[in-house]
Image (cartoon, rainbow, N blue to C red):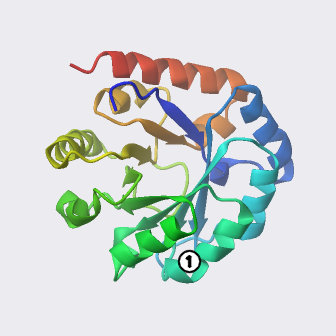
Amino acid sequence: MDNQQPILAPSILAADYTQLGAQIQACNKAGIEWLHCDIMDGHFVPNISYGPAIVQAAADSTDAFIDVHLMIENPDAYIRAFVDAGANQITVHQETCTHLHRTIQSIRQHGLAAGVAINPATSLQSIEPILNDVNLVLLMSVNPGFGGQSFIPATYQRLQRLCTMREEQQADFLIEVDGGVNLDNIEKVSRSGAEVFVAGSAVFKAPDIPQRIADLREKAQIGKEMIV
């Protein structure tokens, strides 16, 4: 993973849905590699966001890698719907999967990359058995459910520990952070070991979206170069 360049994944949860196409085009102008789609069901998290139709609209508006994050109960029942909507990767929460290996296998059998996510209070040890079976591990840096929350500082240490676990298991997954990432902390988030940075409000509330993406990328790269 040493050669992995920082990946910025703007989250359309924070977009203005009356201007969604235009705002995704602004992201495209900045050359984004990934577009992040947060799916919330009002059960696992206290909010409802959107479903496969919006994911499909987003996928049709970009050539970026469509990164779908299912913050929902019973994710197995909806994998096919998001595959059909154009997802390139589906990430599920450890907390919602009774049979996590089976869920990850189901995603991969559809030809997609598969990720596992955990909430801030969930132990890293809970995902240790799955680390060699996933393409990505997503650490929530806020309690999921709403955009615009503040980054939880304990995430820095969790990132460092996850990097150590990856080395110990000789695993091959990307490390993604979701929640409260902004210009003030992305450098330290990167320095702590993150490789994929979900940014919602920090991107879509900016007056100049392409410039903000460039600035976030630059700071993430500085952080990466500071890793000893």
Residue 225 showing in the rendered view: yes
Q: Residue at x 77, y 27 (%)?
A: 29
* Residue 186 at x, y percent in the picture: 42, 29
- Image quadrant where one finds the C terminus: top left
Q: Nearer the viewer, residue 209 or 37?
A: 37
Q: Is residue 195 left or right of residue 22?
A: left
Residue 73 pos. (x, y %): 48, 80
Location of mark 1 (residue): 42
- Given residues 154 and 28, the one toward you in this image is 28
In the structure shown, which secondary structural element does the residue marked by tag 1 occupy? loop
Location of residue 176 (image quadrant): top left
Q: Is residue 29 above or below residue 102?
A: above
| Residue 168 left/right relative to 10 | left
| Above/below status of 193 relative to 89 | above
How far across and down, in percent of the image, does residue 51 sit? Answer: 69, 70
Which residue lies at the image location 41% right of the left edge and 45% below the top edge? 177
* Residue 207 occupies quadrant: top right
Q: Is residue 53 left or right of 135 when viewed as pictured? A: right
- The amino acid at mark 1 is Gly
